[in-house]
Amino acid sequence: MNNKYENLRIKLVGRVEYHELLKLHEKAWALVFPSIWEEPLPYAVVEVMALGTIPIASRVGGVTELLNDIIAQQFMVSPSSINDLVKKISTMLSLNTDELKVLGFKLRSEILRKLDLDKIERRIIEVFEEGY
């Protein structure tokens, strides 16, 4: 039987030290983040995108705000939907190495642009100025 997933390596890790985490990202193509919690700023998702790792994440809380309007939006899943999660993981597995690299590079650029501190500072000042 021809198993297209024979080389698939999924590693479940518990708590790891930060320096170990960075080493894991050198090998990882995706982070599965099936949260149902309304986190205002899901730091794990922000961090993986900045490293060029693609998040397969639930459409809840701050995840939705972070991933809307960027390439990672296509990998968001409905909370508690196993079928949706499996489809997104299958989509990820169907991509070849070059496609994954391009996707990760684009994602990194998009999230760094979206979270640009100068842009955020200007927008906050605009909001306060509009109130006066």
Image (cartoon, grey):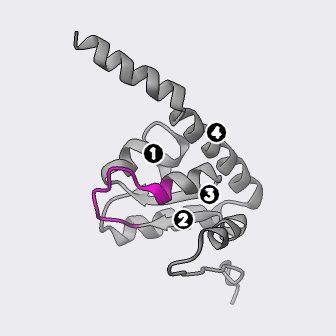
Q: Is residue 79 above or below residue 116?
A: below
The CA distance from mark 3 to mark 4 is 12 Å
Q: Residues within 10 Å of mark 1 (few under 14, many from 20)?
A: many
Q: Residues within 10 Å of mark 2 (few under 14, many from 20)?
A: some
**Residue lying farthest to the right in this orientation:** 98
List the residue tagged with mark 2.
31
Horizontal side, residue 38 vs residue 18: left or right? left
Say whether disc 2 or disc 1 marks the residue closer to the N-terminus: 2
List the residue tagged with mark 1.
67
List the residue tagged with mark 3.
53
Query: Does dot 2 land on a helix, a strand or a loop?
Result: strand
Write the start and end of the magenta stretch as one range: 34-45
Q: Tell me if label 4 and label 1 are in contact, CB under 8 Å.
A: no
Say whether disc 4 or disc 1 marks the residue closer to the N-terminus: 1
Camera sees residue 75: no
The CA distance from mark 3 to mark 2 is 7 Å
Query: Does dot 4 land on a helix, a strand or a loop?
Result: helix
List the residue tagged with mark 4.
109
Identify which amino acid the numbered label 4 is placed on.
Answer: Ser
Q: Main secondary structure of the magenta part?
A: loop
* Magenta span contains residue 132: no
Image spot of residue 75 (x, y percent): 48, 54
